[in-house]
Image: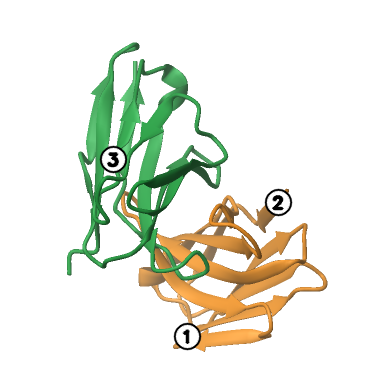
Chain colours: A orange, B green
Amino acid sequence: KQEVTQIPAALSVPEGENLVLNCSFTDSAIYNLQWFRQDPGKGLTSLLLIQSSQREQTSGRLNASLDKSSGRSTLYIAASQPGDSATYLCAVRVQTGANNLFFGTGTRLTVIP
Amino acid sequence: NAGVTQTPKFRILKIGQSMTLQCAQDMNHNYMYWYRQDPGMGLKLIYYSVGAGITDKGEVPNGYNVSRSTTEDFPLRLELAAPSQTSVYFCASGRQSTDTQYFGPGTRLTVL
């Protein structure tokens, strides 16, 4: 069974700093990997989706990388802002079945003004 | 488009009571999902549906039931509520099994 781990569980940084969030998974046979943002009391919002054949995806100040062979992904946030404060979840989609999305426990990010 | 909507937002139940969590989507997605999120844990799949009339169990189905009579609606039924079902419940939908899932705002359920 796929296990997804995110470290650290919580992170505080001053505004303007660049930062990296980590995600690791145990089975490299994945279809794609997705990063979500979750605000308190809200649902999940998809940020970036990387297909297994890709190495990275970028959207604005966000860049996600994927190293399938080592079972790792990183989410890089440039020039962090207080509005980036949220919990970031990594989810791995395995190759078969509709029951195929496995979530990490998330990293709670606080950007201090 | 409203996307994925869930009702209620909050609910407190007593042990042994029953309730239905409502979920609807207006994106004409075939796939719909119910997850639960416990504090400090990742989301766990309860049930999913690949189309109207078709449902299947996920990782943690015990104590729950679902139905899918229409493409739009996917209610989750809790029978005989237990404290272990205290959680935040999210409904999601997607066009295909490998596509991005779109999530509702969640229902926070407490069983006392």
Residue drawn where x is 44% and y is 47% of the image: B48
> In the figure, B41 relative to A9: above or below?
above
Q: Nearer the viewer, mark 3 or mark 2?
A: 3
Q: Nearer the viewer, mark 3 or mark 1?
A: 3
Q: Residue furthest front?
A: B53
- Report in which chain the residue with disc 3 lies: B
Q: Residue furthest right?
A: A70
B65 or A104, nearer to the observer: B65
* Residue B56 x, y percent position in the rendering: 48, 43
A18 or A71, nearer to the observer: A71
Which disc, if any, is residue A61?
A: 1
Q: Describe residue A68's horizontal placement relative to residue A96 as left or right.
A: right
Dots 2 and 1: beta carbons under 8 Å? no
Q: Circle 2: is it few (<14), some (14-19), or many (20+) Cα within 10 Å?
A: few
A82 or A87, nearer to the observer: A87
> In the figure, B11 relative to A74: above or below?
above
Q: Describe residue A52's horizontal placement relative to residue A60 as left or right.
A: right
In the picture of the structure, the residue carrying the numbered disc 3 is: B75
B54 or B25, nearer to the observer: B54
